[in-house]
Image (spheres, helix red, strand yellow):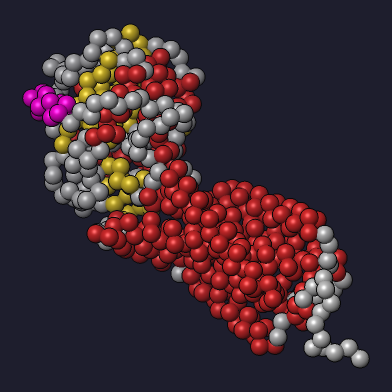
Amino acid sequence: MIDPHAPAPPGAPPPWRGPARLPVRPDTGRFLVLACVFVCAACGLVYELELVALASYLMGDSVTQASVVLSVMVFAMGIGSLAAKRLRRFAAAGFGALEAALALVGGCSAMALYAVFAWTGDWGGLWADGPRILLVAFSLAIGVLIGAEVPLLMELIQRVRRQDAGGAVADLFAADYVGALVGGLAFPFLLLPFLGQMTSSLLTGAVNVVAGGALVLGLFRRDVSRRARWLLAVASLTVLGILASAAVLADDFEHAARRALYGDDVRVAVRTGVQEVVLTGGTDGRPLDLYLDGRLRVGGHDERRYHEALVHPAMNGPHARVLVLGGGDGLAAREVLAHPGVHRVDVVERDPGLVRLARTDPALSRLNTHAYDDPRVHVTPADAFHWLRGAPQGAYDVVIADLPDPGITDSTKLYSQEFYGLARRVLAPGGRLVVHGGPVTDRARVFWTVETTVRAAGLRTTPYRVTGDGTGRTDRAPRDWGFVLAARGPRPALRLDPHERPPRTLTQAGLTADARAAERTRVPGLRASTLVHPRY
C-alpha cells in the first residue's frame, strides 16, 4: 500500500502538477486551452488599444500617450508574471479569478477614464493631471493581470498533456500572438466604428470573463473545489452584471459626460468617422461653439476675429485663386469670399462629415453665410499633406492653412518643413501663405518653432498675433492666436487692403501693434520641425 504522506520520489512533479481530471480527451482539452489563450490575448490587446485611443482623444499627443500606456503595461506584465508563480498551485481557480478581475478592470477602464476627464479634469493643484494618473493606474493594473495569465495558462496546458517546455511555450505564444492580431484588427475596423469606445471595452470585458469562466468551470471543474466553483461562478456573474448594466447606461452616461464637458447647451454631437464633432449654442441668440475631439475649434464670441486675422492680411495682393487647407467649417471660406476678385476657392478638408454639417446645420451654415453654396467654392475630402503632393505647381495666389494646433500629434506633419515646402511649390510668383501657429502667449516656443519651420522651407515670414475680445471667454479659449504670413519673394507686409471693405474686428493700427507684441516673445535658437524630427 502506498503511503499518501510519503515524500515524492526525486524528480517527480509535485502533486498539484499532476494530470488534470478532464471531461474530454487530452487533445480536445489542449485545443480548448489554446482557444482560451487566443480569446484572452485578443481581449488584452483591445484593452491596450482602448486606453491609447481614449487617452489620445482626451489628452492629445498620441505618441506620448501610446508610449506611456505601452511602456507601463509591459513593465507591469513582468511584475504580473512573477506574482503568478505563487498561484501555480491553484492554476485553474487562480486563472478564473484573474479573468474576472481583468474583465472588470479592462471593461470599465474607458468609462472610468472618460468620467474622470469630464467631471474632475480641472482638479487643480496636485490632481490637475487626474486623467493621466488614472491612465497610468489602469495600465499598471491591466498589465499585471495580463502578465499573470501566461504562467497560469502554461501550467494548465502542461496539466492537460505534458510536453517539452519548448513545445508548450511555442504553442502558447502562437495562440497568444494570433489572438493579439485579431484583437488589434478588430478594434479599429469593427469595434470602434460600430460600438464606440465605451461599449466596445464593455463587450470585450464580457467576452473575457465568459472565456475564463467557461474554461475553468467547464474543462477544469474537477480540479476546483465545490466552494471555489461557487465563488468563481458568483464573481463571474457579478462582473457580467456590472458590465451589462454599464452597457445599458452607456448612452445616458455619455450624454451626462458631454454636459459636464460642454455645458447644458449641447445641440449636435456626432462621430463622423474621422473625429467627434460637437456644436453648442447657435440658437436663441446664444453664440455657436464648435468642438473637434473635445477641443474648442470655433468660439462663437470671437471666431470672426480669428478668421479675419487669418484671412485678410494674406488677401492683400493678387487673390483670384485661393486654397484653404482645413477649414471644413466654412468660416475661412466666408472671409475669402468677402473679397472681390476671387474666382476660385479650393477647400481641402479630411473630414467630409464636418463639411456636410457646415452645409446643413442651420446655425453653422448661417455663421459661414452659406459659403459652400457659392459656385466658386470646391471641396475635396483629402488629407492636406497627401493632396499637396499631387497639386499643380504655381496654381494659387493665396494658401490658407486653417489647421488644428501643432501640439496635436496627428497634426505635426502639417507643421513640418516638408509640408511648407509642398505649400511653397503650389504658390504662384508673388503668392502668399498664412499659417495658424497656435497661441503665442501660452505656447511661445511652439509658435516660434512654426515660424522657424516656415522660413526653413524657403519662405520669407512676417509673424503676428491677435488677441480675443474677452467677451464670454471660457478657460478653453486661448488668450490670443498666432499667425505666420509668408511669401516666396520679398518679406510680405502686414497690411489690410485699403481698397476693399475693411474687416469688422481688425484695424491696421491694431495689427501693427499686435505684431510688435508678438515679436517680443520670440524664442531664439529654435530648429525647424521635420517629419523625422518633430519638435512640437
Image height of 467 relative to 278, above or below: above
In the displayed structure image, the side of residue 277 where residue 175 appears, left or right: right
Q: Position of residue 308 (x, y in %)?
A: 21, 30
In the displayed structure image, the side of residue 91 where residue 498 appears, left or right: left
The residue most toward the right is: 1
Point 30% across, 42% down: residue:
297
The residue most toward the left is: 509
Image height of 79 relative to 286, above or below: below
Does residue 514 belong to the magenta stretch?
A: yes
In the displayed structure image, the side of residue 272 where residue 9 appears, left or right: right
Does residue 150 belong to the magenta stretch?
A: no
In the displayed structure image, the side of residue 23 where residue 311 appears, left or right: left
- Camera sees residue 54: yes
Which of the pair 369/54 is nearer the observer?
54
Point 18% across, 35% down: residue:
305
Q: Can you tell which quarter of the image residue 370 is in? A: top left
Q: Position of residue 476 (x, y in %)?
A: 25, 49
Point 57% across, 52% down: residue:
187
Q: Main secondary structure of the magenta part?
A: helix
* Count of number-bearing discs: 0
Name the quarter where the N terminus is drawn: bottom right
Q: Position of residue 128 (x, y in %)?
A: 29, 57
Q: Position of residue 536 (x, y in %)?
A: 35, 35
- Camera sees residue 200: no
Magenta stretch: give its range.
508-520
Point 34% across, 18% down: residue:
456
